[in-house]
Image (cartoon, grey):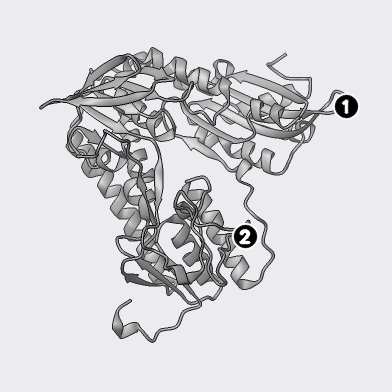
Amino acid sequence: MPSSDSSSEFDVVVIGGGPGGYATALHGALAGLRIAVVERDKVGGTCLHRGCIPAKAFLETATVVRTVAGAQDFGVGVGQPSIDFTVSQARKQAVVEQLHKGLAGLMRRRGITVYPGTGTLLSVPRSLPGFEIDGRLVLTSDEVLALDALPASVAIIGGGVVGCEFASMFRDLGVPVTVLEAMDTLLPECDRDIVAWLSRSFRQRGITVHTGAQVKGQSAAESGTTVLYDAESVTVDAVVVAVGRRPLTDGLLADVTGVVVDSRGFVVVDDQMRTTADGVWAVGDVVDTPQLAHVGFAEGILVVRGILGEPVVPVDYSRVPWCIYCHPEVAYAGLTEAAARQRGFDVAIQRYPLGGNSRARIIGDFEGLVKIVATRQADGRTGPILGVHMVGPWVTEVLGQGYLGVNTEAVPDDIARFIQPHPTLSESFGETVLALTGRGLHLG
């Protein structure tokens, strides 16, 4: 901290101004705590500056291109859209800067002191041996989001959340895409029925996907590179390494602090986010929990409650909402069908294809599915909802009802009596729940 403020005392000092850090600060300040945040870059962290927000801004550009390209289906003649990616980049950056300005202003208004300094805990993209990041041929998400021109073709190593989002974005922007995923499926943590719909959509859009692909290296040339996998290869203009992010804890903690860091670099915490040192908590990308901004928000709120001595309910990570902004979108909360069966539940399953949803037909985007996993009780009736899984248009906005259903352990008989607005995409959840009662309106 600056020497002029070295005598300042705070109730809480937050190292890192990312989602977990600034959520802790904002929530704590409202509770009357005096808060300081130490941040070496800009508050907002990876999510705002190098992750969620800029990525979704580019994905929205892709949505506009796709919408304009399909305008003739609605009787609107506009011709084939062209892309000026420098404008897209400038718009993305304007969105990021406006949100950063708003966040910084909110922190000032709540009396939070922000110190520029090192020691910030962030996460950084992982890389692969043989694919050293050079910003030209080999890119991570950081470099992709800083592009001012589109590559002629890309290979994306990794078919997880980031890989699928970038594959969808590049394809909508006219770039040929090949996805290489080491596992036997895209999005390994998702329900298999949802992945099947997404995989089929990717194929129909011309995205080449190779699962079970073991990447062995590359042979770089002056204007491109050939990626070697299994006994095959693909030559592309650029490679995007999308294999996740790792915690950047190097040099953050001295041994004398008593804070334990595991072999992968994550800070060890209990279910109340307390580290092994008194008075030290850890949240966000530094801990081995889902690397989602909203998880960091929840963990930050939990920490403040613990500091204040209020009752603390640990985060149930098996029920957090997941949203994937590729096309079609994917959203889910709770257990997959496979996970529920592995835990020994007798399950009841209901699926609702979005082709029967009026709003989906109106907007002309009706490829998708809602799937609910619930318990089956001894009397044959459907018990509490265990998981809700969706793929299709705007499902990231539709998940709300399903998330509440999972987290309140709601029973379909109770939810089914509530009225769903018509025509909406959200009524697809209500239709699926109603069918689970055995008396569906449009489902058998």
Q: Name the residue under label 1.
A: 378
Label 2 is placed on what type of residue? Gln
Image height of 102 relative to 409, above or below: below
Residue at 32%, 47% (x, y): give it.
50
Tag 1: residue type?
Ala
Which quadrant of the figure has residue 405?
top right
Quarter of the image holding residue 170? top left
Q: Where's residue 27, x and y in %? A: 52, 65
Instruction: Pick whichever, 368 or 236, lies toward us.
Output: 236
Residue 386 on image: x %, y %: 70, 34
- Where residue 107 sits, quadrant-wise, is bottom left
Dot 2: within a 10 Å radius of its alpha carbon, few (fewer than 14), some, or many (20 or more) residues? some
Residue 424 seen in this snapshot: no
Crowding at dot 1, Cα within 10 Å, few <14 / some 14-19 / many 20+, comes out as: few
Q: Which mark is residue 114?
A: none
Quick one: SS at disc 1? loop
Do the residues bearing badges 1 and 2 touch, measured as CB atoms within 8 Å? no
Q: Nearer the viewer, residue 392 or 241?
A: 241
Task: State whether residue 363 appears in this view.
Answer: yes
Q: In this view, does 21 lie above or below 443?
A: below
Q: Distance between the residues labelled 1 and 2?
A: 36 Å
N-terminal label among 1 and 2: 2
Side (left or right) of 118 relative to 261: left
Left or right, residue 130 beside residue 123: left
Residue 432 percent location from the top left of the image: 67, 24
Q: Mark 2 points at which residue?
A: 272
SS label for mark 2: loop
Q: Residue furthest bottom?
A: 7
Q: In which quarter of the image is the C terminus?
A: top right
